[in-house]
Image (cartoon, helix red, strand yellow):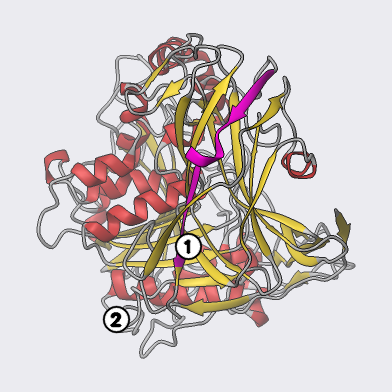
Amino acid sequence: MTTSASLSLQVNAPIAHAAQQSNPQYSYAKSIREKIWVQSTVDSDGTGDKDMISVDIVRPVGADGVAITDVPVIMDASPYYYNLGRGNQSQVKRDLDVDGVVDSFPLFYDNYFVTRGYAVALVDSSGTGRSDGCTDLGGPAERAAVKAAIDWFGGRTGGYRDWGMTQSVLASSWSSGKVGIIGKSWDATLANAMLTYGTDPSKGGLPNLRTVVPIAGISSWYDYYFSNGVSLRNGEAPSALAGLVANNNAKSRCKTAWAAMDKAAGYGTDSYGVKNAFWRDRDYVSMLWNAPVASGTSPGVFMVHGAKETNVKTTHFGELWDVVQARQMPHKLWLSQLNHVDPFDYDRTAWVATLHQWMDHWLKGIDTGIMLDANKPTIERNQAGAWIKYSNDWSLSSPGKADTVQYLPGPEKSFTASAGGQTEDSMYLDKKNLIYDIKSTPTRLSGRPQIGIRAKLQSPGTHLTVMLVDTVAAGSYFNRVDPLKADTSPICDNGAKPCDGALSVQTLASSSDLCNQTGEDAARKDSCAYRDVQRQSINSDFHVISRGWLDTRYDRATNTKHDNTAGVWYDFVADLTPLDYVLEQGHTLKLVIGGSDQSLTQVSTTSTTVTVDPARTYIEYKEAFDS
């Protein structure tokens, strides 16, 4: 049972106070804004010419109006700049005087970092915004586009003032060549892809890529689309998502390329959901693991994710994080207990300060002290806004954790996996599903749980859902936070002050130092006022903290699909989503086994009876005892 609550929670993540840092000293209003074109190495839209990629730059000038040199670059490559926009205010690039140069940059990076001696570069990924080419879900075209931009800053490829490549331009006249790539969601996914290039000299390498900051990024496109053969996107074709963000040129030119992409992915066949070559080419975890890392070329990795992610699930950060550790790459982690949220919105002050120190260290070589405890993960403890910096590094299964393998009690039990499935709440509340008590003593659950199920079916196949649920006794309640809700009040374009009636707008010029020299931003019409965001909480007697899904026809050992034989016992294994969660006193951890998850997956279209043998069914979970 759930009831609404009016409590809004404030978060205060710890700030690593800097010994030194860059300070605002350059005029934002006088900054140089320019459009640069770089040429990709691929012709993804079949025009006969290699893709031209659009890069919008804002960079500082000195008091005398002369551009400063040795400027590092903070880059955000995205497919969203001219469609969905970025941030809670869906900010897009705007060319207000229609001269071909972007005047208004989305997000806060330009407002904050340019005055501190950084350039900010926003790249339209292939087939989006003003760039040529096709969107291909983090595939060769998108990767080549972003790599070309980083290569230009590093002096390894040409750049041009015009699309026709008649006016060449060098970044070396002002740039140090050092690049840090950041972004959220698809942007972070492209950053993850660049991590594989930045460490692999066999791919040409990216020696000037000094840091990668992925916020809720995909690390394997298969794991974004499927879990053990079950579609996480309702059976959607890859071309559907590619077309969603594509520009008009791509929509007209890329139909053939997208059809080939769907075919390569297995869409429309019974093998859709098998991890084939198409999906392996978009698996950055394996690519990074297999990359022959050259000595001294590893960029620093600052990974940010939400432990309650239902979009880019925690599998993405967890698996990539383990490879980053194994490759001994410098790393830092922020893990909230929220969903698909930028830390700029859930803890603005701490995030901006920490990111500033990180960028100063990796791009300017300033001793900010940020790396002194970088291997101690900063993790939000449950919902209450209390952050803990743990002594042991986080991983899927590291030393400092105890593995518990618990077989289930009782006789064989059956339930009906219904056509159309159930919501997650209904699955827990429906006592006809299989529900077992797992643990009722306080502990910190951390890492990736795994389920092994011995079961037989009365049909050729179905979908199964497994959930770990934090519960309290009937009649008791505890507070849990649902996704964040942004203030919807109007907001001024110039960022100088909140509009009349904008009660929850945070004027960052005074509160967080994001707008320097207020009034200069007004001249550029580049807003640096951002809405406050509150956590929306509810009272409940249960909360799903980890989940997993499997198609009983999918054999993960052989990566194939085949029908089940009715009445025959099978052993199914599935990983659940990684977590870091504190089970409190008086709470009980329960395991739920049910049919299709209507909330997050494509449902099975037929009903069947599933019989489970508890004596041969186990849940494996990990407990961490460090502090």
Give the quadrant of residue 131: top left
Q: Is residue 159 visible?
A: no
Q: Is residue 209 left or right of residue 568?
A: left
Magenta residues, as a range? 608-623
Considering depth in this image, is 607 or 524 the residue closer to the camera? Answer: 607
Q: What residue is rendered at 56% in x and 17% in y?
A: 461
On screen, residue 18 above or below 600? below
Amino acid, disc 2: Ile
Residue 446, label in figure: 1
Considering depth in this image, is 276 or 78 the residue closer to the camera? Answer: 276
Considering depth in this image, is 448 or 339 the residue closer to the camera? Answer: 448
Counting residues from the N terminus, which is met first, the one under dot 1 or under dot 2?
Answer: 2
Residue 366, label in figure: 2
Q: Is residue 243 left or right of residue 450?
A: right
On screen, residue 6 above or below 217? below
Q: Is residue 529 visible?
A: yes
Residue count near mark 2 (Cα–Cα under 10 Å), binned few <14, some 14–19, many ≥20: some
Assign a secondary structure to mark 1: strand
